[in-house]
Image: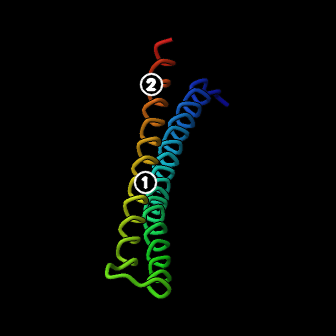
């Protein structure tokens, strides 16, 4: 029987290529799920304060009626606070991603 010395090297190359493909696929899957999760989190961070404001406004309209609608006013306040909160959270996540990429570039140079 003839020994083929190239076979282990060939097997190692195939194995490393397969591992790179699997890592890339995992990264894409994580990115998709984290993106969907972020959209859900941002949506809830806007919707919950708006709904809480509307609920409080309905209660105030029933117990302390005014010419202006408490419901509409507090729903707008809740929506504004929710949007500001979501914007702050997305900005923080974006900065975290930029810092992580900068660290990776710094490690690649070393």
**Image quadrant in which you'd find residue 39:** bottom left
- Residue 2, which numbered label? none
**Image quadrant in which you'd find residue 35:** bottom left
Residue 73 on image: x %, y %:
36, 71
Q: For this rendering, which residue is in front, 109 or 53?
A: 53
Q: Residues within 10 Å of mark 2 (few under 14, many from 20)?
A: few
Q: Residues within 10 Å of mark 1 (few under 14, many from 20)?
A: many
Q: Residue at x 49, y 79 (%)?
A: 55
Residue 3 on image: x %, y %:
65, 27
Quadrant occupied by the N terminus = top right
Q: Residue at x 48, y 48 (%)?
A: 25
Work out how far the residue at label 1 is from the one at label 2, CA to CA, in angstroms.
24 Å
Whether 49 is drawn above or below 63: the answer is: above
Whether 41 is drawn above or below 69: the answer is: above
User: Which residue appears farthest toward the left when viewing the image?
Assistant: 67
- Mark whose residue sits in front, 1 or 2: 1
Residue 53 on image: x %, y %:
46, 71
- Residue 102, which numbered label? 2
Residue behind mark 1 = 86
Residue 7 on image: x %, y %:
59, 30
User: Which residue appears farthest toward the bottom when viewing the image?
Assistant: 62
Secondary structure category for the residue under label 2? helix
Q: For this rendering, which residue is in front, 67 or 15?
A: 67
Which of disc 2 and disc 1 is earlier in sequence?
Answer: 1
Q: For this rendering, which residue is in front, 20 or 91?
A: 91
Q: For this rendering, which residue is in front, 106 or 16?
A: 106
- On screen, residue 106 versus residue 19, left or right, reads left
């Amino acid at each position: 029987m003839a020994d083929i010395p190239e076979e282990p090297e060939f097997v190692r190359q195939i194995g490393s290529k397969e591992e790179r493909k699997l890592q890339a696929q995992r990264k894409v899957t994580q990115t998709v799920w984290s993106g969907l999760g972020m959209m859900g989190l941002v949506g809830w961070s806007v919707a919950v304060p708006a709904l809480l404001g509307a609920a409080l406004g309905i209660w105030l309209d029933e117990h302390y009626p005014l010419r202006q609608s408490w419901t509409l006013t507090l729903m707008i306040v809740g929506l504004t606070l929710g949007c500001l909160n979501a914007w702050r959270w997305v900005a923080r996540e974006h900065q975290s991603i930029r810092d992580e990429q900068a660290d990776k570039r710094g490690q690649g140079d070393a």
